[in-house]
Amino acid sequence: MNDLTEYARQNGIYGKRWETNKRKIRGGNPIAKMSMHRILRDKVYIGQIENKKEGTFAKGEHEPIISTELFNRVQIALANNANNKSASTHAPNILTGKLFNHNGVKFINQRTSGKGKKTTYYYATKGFYLTAARVDEIVIKTITDFLNSNMSNLPINLAAILKRIDITNMNFAEKRNLIQSLVEKVVYSQEQLIYTLTIDAQKLQPFIKEHYVNQNTNKMEYIIGDNSITITEKVFLRKYVNTVYDRGKNGVLNVTDNNHLILKAFATAWKYRELYERDGGADNIIHNLHTSPRQFYRYLDIAYMNPDKINEILSGKLKINVNDLFRIAKENQLLLACSTTDCTKSASSTAASTTSFV
């Protein structure tokens, strides 16, 4: 932008100059950087008129004076320019302006600082936050999977363009620009991300790589409508990060990450159970494991859960997150774990009750 404003000044390109009713001359000054930025983003030059109240655009009665393809290339250059000012500049989030909750409320960006670390969240309603970095990772992976999918059911011209987009070798800013153009909106509802993708091939033209063709034809489920493509992805929320409560700001997991946490919870639970049944008293175990009594007995709830319920979870028949796991474990005890250190149950009867599952 600095180079461009200097180029305009040296070539005699100035702002509008006019004369008032009192014959005073106004304007005609060199174009400031902010004004230049506004000019370059104005869609009036590609034949569109903005409804500023609604934030929407419609075709104007005038003819465009530059091509949409050139305009889109300029927008990418502007975004990259903004995203690379310095090493400390944080690029905008992937879904800024695109993410809504099930009531149609748009998520906005909110940043918090603590212990020298800044964290950005998507925020829609009081007390509910989604960690932006984690959501962005999931979105990038989903769009990458879509671009690697078999597109035989898509319109031929759209599929041809999508297969010439190399998202793998894009930097973060380029991925954001692509996703902002490809994704019309994403709705978070009932632990699902519902993506609505454009079928307007023109919007994707600036991202084509001339000598690249994506040869992947992986399977992926999505719905093709008259005006859009819909992808539904299951995600899970968790409020515990490394066993520390995250102040209500939810971490977001895709299915694979969530399953890893479920398995880790079961592994921890069976480890605690083995120590508990071997050594009897809980106090020494809790001390040696550097955990709390509450945490210790929560994991024992999992270890002593009804085997039928465990099979439902581990087989994938019952899809839950880690928070649900602790709740379900407490509600489905086959043999309740002791809640005090003077346990009177024998290790042999405890082990016998779950022999069939183990």
Image (tube, rainbow, N blue to C red):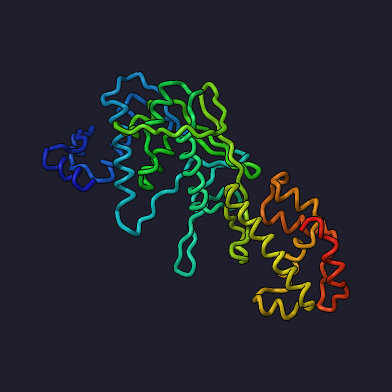
Left or right, residue 26 beside residue 80:
left
How many marks on residues?
A: 0
Q: For the point 62% across and 66% down, which residue is it?
A: 243
- The image quarter containing residue 31 is top left
201 or 40, which lies in front? 201
Query: Is any atom of residue 285 visible in this view?
Result: yes
10 or 174, which lies in front? 174
Q: Judge whether 293 appears above or below 316 on screen.
A: below
Q: Judge whether 102 appears above or below 50 on screen.
A: below
Q: For the point 18% across and 43% down, which residue is it?
A: 30
Query: Is any atom of residue 53 visible in this view?
Result: no
Residue 328 image position (x, y, % from top left): 77, 55
Q: For the point 46% across and 26% down, which residue is it?
A: 199
Left or right, residue 111 beside residue 278:
left
Q: In which quadrant of the rendered image does the N terminus lie?
A: top left
Residue 253 image position (x, y, % from top left): 58, 51
Left or right, residue 111 beside residue 303:
left
Residue 72 image position (x, y, % from top left): 32, 33
153 or 6, which lies in front? 153
Q: In which quadrant of the rendered image does the C terminus lie?
A: bottom right
Residue 164 image position (x, y, % from top left): 36, 31
Left or right, residue 308 beside residue 34:
right
Q: For the point 59% across and 62% down, which residue is it?
A: 241
173 or 71, which lies in front? 173
